[in-house]
Amino acid sequence: MNLSGKVFISTGAFGALGQAVTDCLMSYGARLALVGRRPAVGVKYPAAALVYSGVDISRQDAAAEVVAQVFKETGRIDGLLNLAGGFQWGKLEGSTLEGWDSMFRVNLLTAVASCQAVLPYLLRAKSGSIVNVGAMGAIKAASGMGAYAASKAGVLKLTEALADEVKDHGITVNAVLPSTLDTPRNRVDMPDADFTRWVSPGALAEVIAFLVSDAARAISGVALPVAGRA
């Protein structure tokens, strides 16, 4: 795949998946603008990457501001990778609305605000790609995953609606639905699991790279399961 000269904004860029996506897309020639709420510490990024930490992209004003800054520095925006998200386990019994609100804010509203912020630039260019990270739980939820799965189902429907909204403007919008990712945090949280059945961040990054490439220009509105051997 050749992504030379293209500029992509990656949200939630400072986690394990974000690092894998950065390495993958930049290996294909893309330039990445890395956006995240937490400080970008302890990780070395390529010199060509733009780093924006401390940004709460669930806020429309913050998302719009950072996207405008990326365009100012690069002169173009070719796509958006919505990697920002989080997980919280909890059964409905005894749960609070604050917990549900937290999941919707970190998983869905970050994607909504980021899409809204980047859309004017893609519409003006009459081209571009958006990839949202959903979850297999959006299709089939298990006990304790109600808030998480509902928020990721929202990401799925956002993807479908936006894809239809921009289908005549040269813009593709797709979602990937990973199962459990093989990250250090997940290994700590689930030490008895068979890690070989999980999806590596690098493998998911390759799928995302394909979806923003010219090879996938005829694909839009798709929710693509990336489940390994789950």
Image: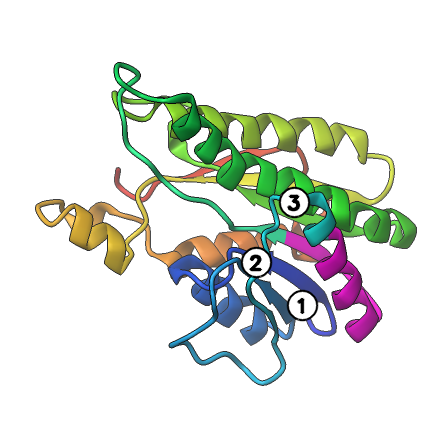
Cα gap from disc 2 to disc 3, whole angstroms = 27 Å
- Numbered label attached to residue 59: 3
Q: Are marks 2 and 1 in contact (CB under 8 Å)?
A: yes
The quadrant of the image that shows the N terminus is bottom right
Which of pointers 2 and 1 lies earlier in the amino acid sequence? 1
**Residue 102 pos. (x, y %):** 45, 35
- Numbered label attached to residue 199: none
Q: In front of the other: label 2 or label 3?
A: 3
Cα gap from disc 3 to disc 1, whole angstroms = 29 Å
**Residue 166 pos. (x, y %):** 81, 35
Is 65 colored magenta in this rendering? yes
Main SS of the magenta segment?
A: helix
In this rendering, does residue 218 appear at all? no
**Residue 180 pos. (x, y %):** 30, 43
Q: Under tag 1, what secondary structure?
A: loop
Q: Which residue shows up at 47% across the image and 58% down it?
A: 205
The amino acid pointed to by label 1 is: Leu
* Range covered by the magenta-colored residues: 64-80
Is 63 colored magenta in this rendering? no
Residue reaching furthest to the bottom: 47
**Residue 100 pos. (x, y %):** 43, 26
The amino acid pointed to by label 3 is: Arg
Residue reaching furthest to the top: 93
Write down the residue under mark 2.
209
Residue reaching furthest to the right: 124
The amino acid pointed to by label 2 is: Ala
